Amino acid sequence: MALRHAAPGEAVHLPPFAASIPIDKKTTALVKTDRFEAIHLVMQSGATIAPHTVDGYLTLQCLEGAVTLEASDRSIALESGDWLYLEPGERHGLSAAEDSSLLLTILFERGGGKSAL
């Protein structure tokens, strides 16, 4: 069965854990095209994503919880409501200090870029 992605103009609800997301909820690709990818990233406390690079502009919004982004030579703490972006090719990794829900967006400059997940 093919993974269902959101259609253009379709609203996607990303509720907080307290509202209904079970903590064992998995990360979900919301949209994936050759130019754009959006991912609802769910991380349990203590989970990590190893350092890697992405072939596009990356934005990360912490919807809930707390994570630390290691990017290049700095550590950046993100809490609920925080947002940031990284330039294409910037090496980064992520660790969850709490159960966390994030919105990850990647914009590929020429299409067909290498995704984060």
Image (spheres, helix red, strand yellow):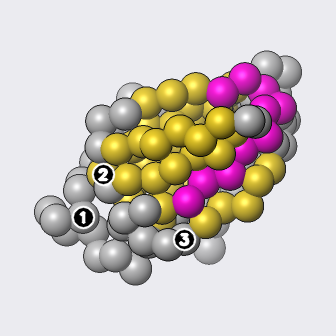
Q: Is residue 93 magenta?
A: yes
Residue 48 in the figure: left or right of residue 108 = left
Residue 21 magenta-highlighted: no
Q: Residue at x 23, y 56 (%)?
A: 16
**83 above or below 100?**
above
Residue occupying image coordinates x 70% and y 56%: 117
User: The residue under label 3 is which amino acid type?
Assistant: Ala
Query: Do labels 3 and 2 touch, CB within 8 Å?
Result: no
Q: Which of marks 1 and 2 is in front?
A: 2
What is the spatial separation of the Cα atoms under label 3 and label 2, in whole angstroms? Answer: 15 Å
Would you say 23 lies left or right of 113 here?
left
SS class of the residue under badge 1?
loop
Q: Do the residues labelled 1 and 2 touch (CB within 8 Å)?
A: yes
Q: Nearer the viewer, residue 35 or 114?
A: 114
Q: Mark 1 points at which residue?
A: 17
Mark 1 or 2, nearer chain start: 1
Residue 89 in percent (x, y) is at 83, 32
Give left or right: position of 14 versus 70: left
Side of 39 where 17 appears, left or right: left
User: Which badge, 1 or 3, comes first in the chain's sequence?
Assistant: 1
Q: Cα distance, mark 1 to mark 2?
A: 8 Å
Say which quarter of the image contains residue 33: top right
Please report the bounds of the magenta region as a residue range.
Answer: 86-95
Q: Quadrant of residue 63?
A: top left
Badges 1 and 3: C-beta atoms under 8 Å apart? no
Q: Which mark is residue 64?
A: 2
